[in-house]
């Protein structure tokens, strides 16, 4: 009887021992695996209030097109409003492109002029194929004329020959306006802009056969008339930039007549009076720059030009409703002069094309840019699963941000972006890469980290099984000897 009791006690002891060792093996395996016995803290970050808003940024955006105009300077560009397309005409270049039978392109250094017409719409250029007798020339001036739903072009030059033709573009081709009894003298590099106050186009200055001019002309109802202006009349010059202001008056800046101007003038088109404007900030003295009203944000945009030291500029300035200049410190196209600039009414932007920065083949460009005030919204990646102080990061598009905090933020335009997550050592996330689409409001994304399992995590089952088998065999052997 006592022997059976001893066996029962031994059996209980063996079972207890096996159970304790099994629990120990499992616990040891889990602890060694890198998975904590307790759940890590979970953090759901709340973005700071300054992130929760739309941000607007002025910037030049480069547009690329497989087909496009040849590199030119001193072309003229206006928006043909009925079809919402920008029309580029003419220009000058120092290269002549030819293509042989095998398709190889060659360039010859010549002083070439163009009479090509190109249309820009939806980020693409297309050449106008309809024939026209309009001559090859640069330095012409053009403006959209709402009363005639047409673009009016005047003047230009070709190797020193000046023109005083008036051409009308109605969407298909250029047509000369004939039967005019009064016209401005032949000239090039005049300033030209439409005024809603007088429902006509103003032409100012330019280079004529007798020298620089400061005469002012009005085009209205298919006829020209000279205007006698008063007040602070700008000096005779070429290459000044002019644009309509929101009130229908005209803003004039810069110009050249042997020296470069940094003066700002406003023409009251109702009283025909010029006023010189004193501004706290003044762009550099320059000529052959571009000036255009940017209706989306109610200011006039000035870009580029050649400065008083003979170098091209790539500065961007705005002339605001307080009649003050302000420089926009933004990334810009290359420094250029003689570029063409026009409102692009299809999407409330301004389009810039071409220009030159020196007189060599490599100095002429055919780059196209749009000036926009783009809206940006925040995408916030919220972290959970990491202990405090560990650094993690995200590559989103071309930007990379990292932090030891609980969230990472990026400012994005609308679009789809690829991302890659950088986890701290010893941690992982179930979705280390992917993409997201930003629309017109803030976007929140969750990133959950977990600890990477250790080696024993993957082998704990086998280890535990082996230990249990060994213990079972040992127990069986002890039991066999006791009951023997």
Image: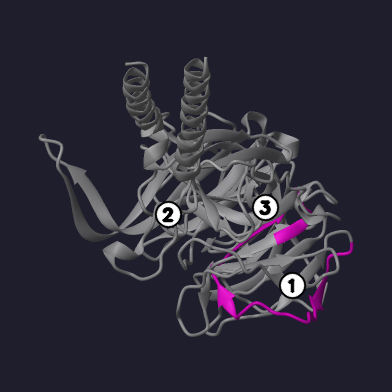
Element carrying mark 1: strand
The residue at which mark 1 appears reads as 325
Residue 291 covered by magenta stretch? yes
Image quarter hosting the C terminus: top left
Q: Is residue 481 above or below residue 463?
A: above
Which region shows up in magenta? 271-300
Disc nearer the start of the sequence (1/2): 2
Q: Which residue is drawn at 51% across and 55% down?
A: 400
**Quadrant of residue 226 within the rendered picture:** bottom right
Residue 438 covered by magenta stretch? no
Disc nearer the start of the sequence (2/3): 2
Could you tell me how far apart the alpha carbons at marks 1 and 2 are, in whole angstroms?
29 Å
User: Which class describes the residues within 10 Å of circle 1: few (<14), some (14-19), or many (20+)?
Assistant: many
Disc nearer the start of the sequence (1/3): 1
Could you tell me how far apart the alpha carbons at marks 2 and 3 are, in whole angstroms?
56 Å
Q: Residue 406 carries which label?
A: 3
Q: Which residue is drawn at 59% across and 41% down?
A: 37
**Quadrant of residue 103 within the rendered picture:** top left
- Which is in the foreground here, disc 1 or disc 3? 3
Where's residue 250, x and y in %?
Answer: 77, 61
Where's residue 273, x and y in %?
Answer: 84, 70
- Whether residue 284 is visible: yes
The residue at which mark 2 appears reads as 91
**Left or right side of 8 for 363:** left
Element carrying mark 3: loop
């Amino acid at each position: 009887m006592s022997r059976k009791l001893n066996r029962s006690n031994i059996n209980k002891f063996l079972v207890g021992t096996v159970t304790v060792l099994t629990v120990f093996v499992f616990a040891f395996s889990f602890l060694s695996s890198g998975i904590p016995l307790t759940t890590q803290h979970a953090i759901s970050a709340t973005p700071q209030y300054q992130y929760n808003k739309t941000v607007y940024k002025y910037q030049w955006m480069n547009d690329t097109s497989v087909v496009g105009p040849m590199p030119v300077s001193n072309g003229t560009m206006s928006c043909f409003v009925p079809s919402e397309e920008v029309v580029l005409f003419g220009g000058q270049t120092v290269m002549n492109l030819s293509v042989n039978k095998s398709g190889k392109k060659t360039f010859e250094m010549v002083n070439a002029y163009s009479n090509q017409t190109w249309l820009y719409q939806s980020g693409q250029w297309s050449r106008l194929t309809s024939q026209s007798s309009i001559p090859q020339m640069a330095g012409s001036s053009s403006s959209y004329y709402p009363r005639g739903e047409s673009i009016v072009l005047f003047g230009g030059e070709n190797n020193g020959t000046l023109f005083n033709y008036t051409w009308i573009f109605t969407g298909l081709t250029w047509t000369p306006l004939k039967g005019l009894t009064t016209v401005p003298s032949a000239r090039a590099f005049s300033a030209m802009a439409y005024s809603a106050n007088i429902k006509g186009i103003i032409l100012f200055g330019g280079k004529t056969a007798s020298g620089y001019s400061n005469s002012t002309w009005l085009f209205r109802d298919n006829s020209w008339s000279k205007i006698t202006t008063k007040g602070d009349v700008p000096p005779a010059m070429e290459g000044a930039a002019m644009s309509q202001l929101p009130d229908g008056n005209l803003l004039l800046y810069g110009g050249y007549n042997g020296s470069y101007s940094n003066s700002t003038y406003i023409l009251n088109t109702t009283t025909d009076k010029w006023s010189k404007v004193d501004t706290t900030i003044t762009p550099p003295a320059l000529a052959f720059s571009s000036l255009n009203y940017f209706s989306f944000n109610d200011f006039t945009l000035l870009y580029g030009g050649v400065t008083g030291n003979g170098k091209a500029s790539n500065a961007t300035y705005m002339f605001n409703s307080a009649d003050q200049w302000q420089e926009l410190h933004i990334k810009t196209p290359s420094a250029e002069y003689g570029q063409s600039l026009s409102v692009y009414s299809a999407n409330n932007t301004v389009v810039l094309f071409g220009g030159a920065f020196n007189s060599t083949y490599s100095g002429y460009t055919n780059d196209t840019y749009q000036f926009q005030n783009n809206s940006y919204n925040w995408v916030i990646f919220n972290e959970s699963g990491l202990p405090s102080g560990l650094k993690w990061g995200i590559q989103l598009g071309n930007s990379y941000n990292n932090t030891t905090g609980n969230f990472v933020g990026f400012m994005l335009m609308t679009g789809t972006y690829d991302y890659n997550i950088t986890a701290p050592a010893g941690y992982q996330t179930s979705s280390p890469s992917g993409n997201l689409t930003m629309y017109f409001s803030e976007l929140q994304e969750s990133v959950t980290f977990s600890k990477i399992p250790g080696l024993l995590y993957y082998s704990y089952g086998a280890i535990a099984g082996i230990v249990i088998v060994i213990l079972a065999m040992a127990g069986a052997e002890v039991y066999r000897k006791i009951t023997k």
